[in-house]
Amino acid sequence: MFNNLLNFLIDFFSSIFIIDSSVLKLSNFFLTTLDQFLIFNLLISCFYFYSSLGRITVVPQIQQNKVELFYNFVATTAKQQLGYQGQQFFVFIFVLFLFIMVSNLLGMIPFSFTITSHIFQTFSLGLAVTIGITIVGFFLSWITFFKFIFTYRSTESISSFVSIY
């Protein structure tokens, strides 16, 4: 029983051999199931937006109306949370929201692979966003960025570890 399960997991997460190293004189290149679904996610997103916005008209058609509704939803949410100063990060928020939404929609297909269910993908995406926000926030508002970490009445034992000024 355990061997059958182990063999199933090995087959399920096995890599697909793509490029022969003898032809290109390079090391072997493998495309895992996670990579395949990331590429599939990108292709679905690009195809949907290209097919929906291929013929933009003044009076929107159904698909164009759906894309504009999705765009307006993300834009108003970003404006409410970040204010007008945060609109410069709208493209990043839009792409991140689109990636997570399409990944979760692909995962709802029966017997499909869910990208966001893997702790590695979720952790790496969250870590990259957190580090990116910290670096951008630090360079935009310099030392005052650390004021956002603590409240006005935070204890001295906590603030002495992180506070610089």
Image (cartoon, rainbow, N blue to C red):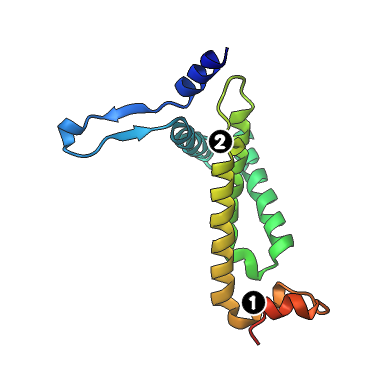
Marked residue nearer the N-terminal end (2 or 1):
2
Residue 66 coordinates in the image, percent (x, y): 64, 38
Q: Residues within 10 Å of mark 2 (few under 14, many from 20)?
A: many
Q: Residue furthest bottom?
A: 165
Q: What residue did someone put label 2 on? A: 115
Query: Dots 2 and 1: beta carbons under 8 Å?
Result: no
Identify the residue at horizontal 48%, vertical 34% (top origin): 34
Helix, strand or loop at label 1? It is helix
Q: What residue did someone put label 1 on? A: 145
Residue 48 coordinates in the image, percent (x, y): 53, 35
Q: Is residue 102 visible?
A: no
3, above or below 130, in the image: above
Identify the residue at horizontal 63%, vertical 66% (top origin): 86
Helix, strand or loop at label 2? It is helix
Residue 82: numbered disc: none
Q: Quadrant of residue 144?
A: bottom right
Q: Is residue 128 visible?
A: yes
Identify the residue at horizontal 48%, vertical 37% (top origin): 38
Q: How many marks?
A: 2
Q: Amino acid at mark 1?
A: Phe
Closest to the observer: 64 or 100?
100
**Left or right of residue 140: residue 75:** right
85, above or below 108, in the image: below
Q: Residue furthest front?
A: 2
153, above or below 109, in the image: below
Q: Amino acid at mark 2?
A: Ile
In the picture, which quadrant includes the N terminus?
top right
Identify the residue at horizontal 65%, vertical 44% (top origin): 70
Closest to the observer: 105 or 155?
155
Residue 134 coordinates in the image, percent (x, y): 58, 67
* Mark pair 2, 1: CA separation: 33 Å
